[in-house]
Amino acid sequence: MYQSADTQVPLFTEEEAANELRVKRGTLRNWRCKGIGPAYVKLGRHPFYPREGIKDFIESRLVQPEQEA
């Protein structure tokens, strides 16, 4: 995991983010092209994913099971 020197924000590489989300790197690339998926920061040519952005993305996908009446 990479930490930005200025902001001290833990940043995942594309590979680390894919592992964290249990998807392929290609899926992350596809999501970026479609404008969906977790928030990311582009440093040069490389995307990095803030830990908080991955957490927020996961939480936004939570599905609450319906309770039986």
Image: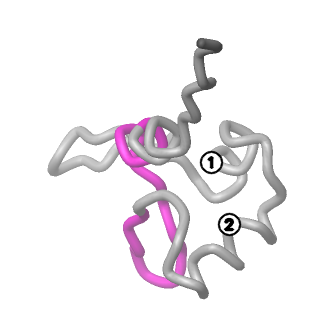
Q: Are marks 2 and 1 in contact (CB under 8 Å)?
A: yes
Queried whether the magenta region covers residue 49, the answer comes back as: yes
Q: Horizontal and vertical percent for residue 51?
A: 42, 39
Name the residue furthest left: 6
Identify which residue, 23 or 48, lies in the foreground.
Answer: 23
Q: Quadrant of the C terminus?
A: top right
The image shows residue 32, relative to residue 9, as above or below, that is below
Residue 11 shows up from this direction: no
Element type at mark 2? helix
Residue carrying label 1 = 17
In the rendered image, is residue 35 in sight?
Answer: yes
x, y (%) of residue 7?
Answer: 17, 47
Q: Residue 16, located in which quarter of the rendered image?
A: top right
Task: Using a 10 Å C-alpha cutoff, classify the residue at mark 2 as few (fewer than 14 neighbours), some (14 to 19) or many (20 or more).
Answer: many
Front residue of 3 and 15: 15
Left or right? Give the position of 42 relative to 1: left
Q: Residue at x 57, y 78 (%)?
A: 32
How crowded is the residue under tag 1: few (<14 C-alpha within 10 Å), some, or many (20+)?
A: many
Q: Say which label, 2 or 1, has the lower sequence index.
A: 1
Query: Which amino acid does the dot numbered 2 rest on?
Result: Leu
Which segment did they paint magenta? 40-55
The stretch drawn in magenta includes residue 42: yes
Residue picked out by circle 2: 28
Q: Quadrant of residue 29?
A: bottom right
Compared with 67, 8 (above or below) is: below
Give the residue type at disc 1. Answer: Ala
Query: In this picture, is 6 found above or below 31?
Result: above
